Amino acid sequence: MAKREKQFVEEITPMEVDFPKWYTDVITKTDLVDYAPIKGFMVVKPYGYAIWENIQNFLDKRFKETGHKNCYFPLLIPESLLTKEAEHIEGFAPEVAWVTHGGNKKLEERLCIRPTSETIICTMYAKWLKSYRELPYLYNQWCSVVRWEKTTRPFLRTTEFLWQEGHTLHETAKEAQDETIQMLKIYKEMCEELLAMPVVDGQKSESEKFAGGERTYTIEALMHDGKALQSGTSHFLGQHFTKAFDITFADRDGNMSHPYHTSWGVTTRLIGGLIMTHGDNRGLVMPPRVAPTQVVIIPIASDKGNVTEKVDDIYKQLKDKGIRVEVDDRPNYSPGWKFNEWEMKGIPVRIEIGPKDIENNQAMVFRRDLLDKSPTSLDNISDYIIDLLDNIHNTMLERARTHRENHTYKVENMDQFKKVIDETPGFVKAMWCGYTDCEAKVKEETGATIRCIPFEQENIGKKCFCCSKEAKHMVYLAKAY
Amino acid sequence: MAKREKQFVEEITPMEVDFPKWYTDVITKTDLVDYAPIKGFMVVKPYGYAIWENIQNFLDKRFKETGHKNCYFPLLIPESLLTKEAEHIEGFAPEVAWVTHGGNKKLEERLCIRPTSETIICTMYAKWLKSYRELPYLYNQWCSVVRWEKTTRPFLRTTEFLWQEGHTLHETAKEAQDETIQMLKIYKEMCEELLAMPVVDGQKSESEKFAGGERTYTIEALMHDGKALQSGTSHFLGQHFTKAFDITFADRDGNMSHPYHTSWGVTTRLIGGLIMTHGDNRGLVMPPRVAPTQVVIIPIASDKGNVTEKVDDIYKQLKDKGIRVEVDDRPNYSPGWKFNEWEMKGIPVRIEIGPKDIENNQAMVFRRDLLDKSPTSLDNISDYIIDLLDNIHNTMLERARTHRENHTYKVENMDQFKKVIDETPGFVKAMWCGYTDCEAKVKEETGATIRCIPFEQENIGKKCFCCSKEAKHMVYLAKAY
């Protein structure tokens, strides 16, 4: 064991020593991602992309069950469209990439690569929509977007990233509001049921909301290092864009009305989130439901006895039950080397089986989350593994919840707040007056921000922790990615 | 019936009158696609995108079964990388879009939006590959690419289009060649088994091959108007790029070698292909296996008897068997109006059911391909429909094959060739000397091109149809999209 431990120490910087370095080591050494030759861009390698495909499959199914359809809008947006909604252009103009030449010709109007697609989509909706009978419009697209970021880190913040963006129109404000909340709930369900990553759901403050929107809802997760990760947002856009883009429809009374509008999205940053929620000093710990490989089988001394036949048999049993399973029968690597590799990659379950195990009608089953290995009967092993994967999911979710509870603090004033933020990073609950001044002061003095006004409000005081005036909301604060 | 026919005449230009206009009418009036506010760009609407999703699902499954994994490479490519392979830059430079500014800053080096990803992918492969043990690399990505085209038409040729691009590396030339052919075969299978669109498979001539490659293989389909559509290509790239990008690996003898390389892709132009293969003057005729909706049920006089219950019952039976079925119970549209709409959208099967049908334990079943309506017993209707969908697929494929055979001609000399190309557009088989001079002359004088040197060679003469010198290959020629 000593040798194996040493190898890990060499490979991955412990998170207690240097958390950002730990993160970078984990994502590159486990082949999730690599740096592209253009600053701020990443290559999502097959192992990382397979995680994204599993997130896509989960969400796409839920989107379709709730009546949404996919479509595809252009990558490029004329400058004149981007500038139609005043707050929107102010928010996005500083960070878009501009195309100025097509082929060898200078373009008459420059085009930006979409940083988000409200403007181009609203242009088309204005052309299409005629009557209330056609509403709601429930459309989504899977694509990449580009935002010219100054500081980047793979998955968490990159110049180009993969995402989905839903864009819906509704007859009434209530329907749009309901849609906004429905989609946030789907995101929360995905985080918890698929990624085993608990999130706090709530509303963003005015200064943190989407540029051009009316209200932004968010889900916020807490990472190992006590920093928050905004993991998905859903925007009630009201009529801001539908007025700016002159989207109208003949309503039930025969009058021309502007519809109500939502947009909502999640990105590949979720992959960063699951790494920083579950990973440890050996590397990744993959939540079983999103893991590209759920079980790896490693034959021991496969030249002896009927090891190969037994491995094939177990592989087939698991495969037939729909488990994503692989056999690592590479002859030129030792079992110990393989154990290391698969542990680093975070495969939830490892099955080791050799001639002695077969004599005892058993296999050794290792679960990555608890680093626990125990002998398991070969009778009904596939049912055992199915239950085990569920158990691992629940254990990981519960452990992450416990971590969050243990790193959630309550404060009454700025002194307490500064002490907590400096000494014990995590979520901080506090009462807030609702004014932007206090919010700006907190950010200025501590670097922390209001992550959200949670739906689940607790009355933990009467005064704003910053200005001591009458409090309006309980909020979650944290330093954030 | 007269009134219905009139409505069609008003809506869709007959293809015999103006084929391009027919195509444009069909794609816009059936809500597949719309023109974006930027010249040459399209919006793929939900109905069109759902077809693309079905193509993706078919191919992605086959790619994975043959050992390929998906990944994602950056959208933008630095100019210095694009220019590394001499023939490649010559082919693509005139048609790329250039990003010159990120945010408010001018970039030090301009970046192009990928027209295809060989250059960025080879840059990463050079960084990753070490040993023969890691080969083959079998990677694919689904994304959009941009090529600044002068003349565009939705699906067939647009500035931005959706596609997949496979990029593989192999130890030996033979393995790379086998991969190239394997992927072409998968494309052919997809065209015939999914889209009911027969294709001729073969090799491109030197002047028509991929810029920077060694050999290009292609599948070519014949459209209603006698023009060919290149429907998918697979390139054996040899060591052109692996040398230019200095991709090396330690081979079995311990020497450093350059791997062999392939790339292969199909695009959303396949949707244009299926429209122009199967469509008629009423609109789309969707091949059942790719149709987003395979069956529509239209209740007649649904307020009477137990029509609604019966419709629900049939819907459930079909749904349970995995058929993509919809019920059109919109109260504010007449059955006749609905028939028109669904016929125009090309839904393979329509089931009409009213009180009288129920009395007779039957429904009226309409098949779009043959415009044939007949009463069908309600007993085991779901099994009947499953068989019918297969029958429709086979009938459509056979009809398209017959159309192709009826529009494939043999010629011996240029006079015959010019007459055929002018008077009876279609595929023309001819013997060719293999020299670029003749190929250029044919293109210059007739606008037709060599579509491919088919794998299935026939000896139909000894002399080149253009120069009368000794013939080397039998080729397919046509005017093409």
Image (cartoon, coloured by chain):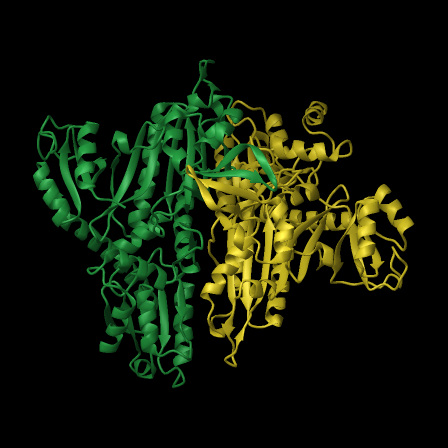
Chain colours: A green, B yellow
Q: Position of residue B227 (x, y in %)?
A: 75, 44
Q: Residue A87, relative to residue B373: is it above or below?
A: above
**Residue toward you, A51 or A282:** A282
Query: Which residue: 46% across, 53% down?
Result: B72
Q: Is residue B59 above or below residue A362?
A: above
* Residue A468 in view in this figure: yes
Q: Quadrant of residue A94?
A: top left
In the foreground, B453 or A59: B453
- On the image, the x and y values in percent for residue B236 come to 63, 63
> Of residues B151 and A258, which is closer to you in this image?
B151
Q: Position of residue A144 (x, y in %)?
A: 45, 44
Residue pictured at 18% horizontal, 52% vertical: A403
Res A375 visible: no
Residue B302 picture location, percent across and down: 52, 28
Give the number of marks.
0
In this rendering, is residue A387 above or below B368? Answer: below
- Apparent side of residue B157 relative to residue B142 in the rendered image (left or right): right
Q: Quadrant of residue A475?
A: top left
Front residue of A149/B406: it is: A149
Quadrant placement of the N terminus of chain A: bottom left
Residue B402 to residue A312: above or below:
above
**Residue at the bottom extreme, as displayed:** A304
